[in-house]
Amino acid sequence: MDIHLVSSIDSAEFTHLTRALSQSTIIGLDAEWKPLRSQRSTFPTVALLQLACQLGGDSAGWDESVIFLLDLASIPLPSIWELIRDVFVSPDILKLGFKFKQDLIFLSSTFCAQGCNLGFDKVEPYMDITNLYKFLQHKEGNKVSKNTKSLSAVCEEILGLHLSKELQCSDWSERPLTEEQIRYAATDSHCLLGIFKIFEAKVIKEGHLCNNVEEQHQSDISLGLKDILNMSDCENKLVGTKFCNAVDIVQATASSEECERIAKGAQVVRKTKPMDESLWKIVRKYGEKLILRESDRTPKTSRKKGRRRSSVVVVCKEKQLDNYGDWQGPQPWDISLGGDGSPKFLCDVMVEGLAKHLRCVGIDAAIPHSKKPEPRELIDQAYKEKRVLLTRDAKLLRHQYPINNQIYRVNSLLKNEQLLEVIEAFQLKISEDQLMSRCTKCNGRFIQKPLSTEEAIEAAKGFQRIPNCLFDKNLEFWQCKDCNQLYWEGTQYHNAVQKFIDVCKLKE
Ligand SMILES: [Zn+2]
């Protein structure tokens, strides 16, 4: 077995890994963690992720495989999160696992704990060894046993290979790993490839793959890339092939300097080689997907115990948050993180009043898309829009996946105090000309040029009444670009400006 232990991203092993991933069409996945002795309200931390890569493509023979052991205890997880996530969802790589959902849950929780916001939520295409085993058994006319066998039992039966179970419960968080641990971990993922190979051979030999797929595929060849992308089934292998061809053509015609640049870019986009024909058919017919749902993300403890424990967790979290005092950056809108530098918040339903106050002082403060958002929706929205989620909801904090550095528990009860708390915690700079520069109704910006009274009356027709008493006052009107609401510099406006000058202590 060709085994590589990857403990840093600045290593030759890591380069080897990324190269192997771009050439793999099948990957056996497994993970190891230190078992938790008692029932806890958290998931165990995954210490090792094994990737047994079956190298595909034209040059590599089908027997070529290489195993990587990713030392998750040493590598900073945010630096490899994207790579792993892309492998998990790449349509060009079939993922094999043995009841991998459990591993995925723990992996996701481990990555989230290190600030990889969303963890992992999908592995596709995926095939589970338990299903392959059932298929193989069934085809041999055996009685399919109801109880799923252990991986070592399956291995013994299918491959005649003995897997020692001794090390399964060893301490995987200890470093350095022993030779035996390394060998054990590698074998566990490598045997998945072996079992798949037997399954594949049988499927092909017995002709389970219908030819319709091929015919349909043939007819696709005349289509352009655009047509293919418009097809409902755009995981088409053809797309991958055509895209790779396009990259090759561009590379071949470009100058050497450009070539290098394109190659670098292509490496990012062209992560993998497309599968070969028969594998692609197998995936279309037997492939499945693993999806993590909200309910999978919290440990299942018995109800009574779970309740008591979770209340303890809340107390701890609150304590911790009180100690935070000030926000500890970087903030998601930070330019170094790809943001635009201007603060953005998402106010949970419990602090909707705070959203209006923030808008009054010119801060971008959105509210949830739906009236009763699920925690997951809130977190997704905050993540996508690079906002800090402001909440008073302790349950959100208890949630297994608070996005790191993107959720803030508001302690104050009153709107004015909440506003001050947020301004102070995030060191927001508020100036007088920022006041009333945003639509308090919808968080939209105003159109650049103020409207005259006549223009405003015209613009307000049908949805907003402008009091007659304003007509002869020669006021300026402002209209929201998004919801069309009109605002004017009346008494209300001046009172509001004064109020926020006081609240934000702008005159001190
Ligand atoms: Zn508006």
Image (cartoon, helix red, strand yellow):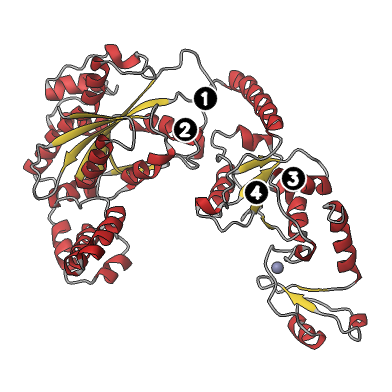
Question: Which residue is identified by label 4?
Answer: 372
Question: Which residue is identified by label 3?
Answer: 424
- Dot 4 falls on a residue whose secondary structure is loop
> Is residue 291 in view?
no
- Give the mark nearer the N terminus: 3 vs 2: 2
Residue placed most toward the observer, 155 or 353: 353
- Give the mark nearer the N terminus: 1 vs 3: 1
Name which residue lies at 14% across and 51% down: 276
Quadrant location of ligand 1? bottom right
Dot 3 amino acid type: Glu
In the image, residue 119 lies at what x, y percent? 45, 39
Residue placed most toward the observer, 123 or 34: 34
User: Looking at the image, do the residues carrying marks 2 and 1 touch, with CB atoms under 8 Å apart?
Assistant: yes
Dot 4 amino acid type: Lys
- Dot 3 falls on a residue whose secondary structure is helix
Question: Which residue is identified by label 1?
Answer: 42
- Please tell me how crowded label 3 is: few (under 14), some (14-19), or many (20+) other residues with Cα within 10 Å: some
User: Looking at the image, do the residues carrying marks 2 and 4 touch, with CB atoms under 8 Å apart?
Assistant: no
Badge 4 residue CB within 8 Å of ligand 1: no
- Please tell me how crowded label 1 is: few (under 14), some (14-19), or many (20+) other residues with Cα within 10 Å: some
- Dot 2 falls on a residue whose secondary structure is helix
Q: Is residue 426 left or right of residue 74?
A: right
Residue placed most toward the observer, 457 or 322: 322
Mark number for residue 109?
2
Badge 3 residue CB within 8 Å of ligand 1: no
User: Looking at the image, do the residues carrying marks 1 and 3 touch, with CB atoms under 8 Å apart?
Assistant: no
- Please tell me how crowded label 2 is: few (under 14), some (14-19), or many (20+) other residues with Cα within 10 Å: many
Q: Quadrant location of residue 498? A: bottom right
* Quarter occupied by the N terminus: top left
Q: Is residue 187 left or right of residue 325?
A: left
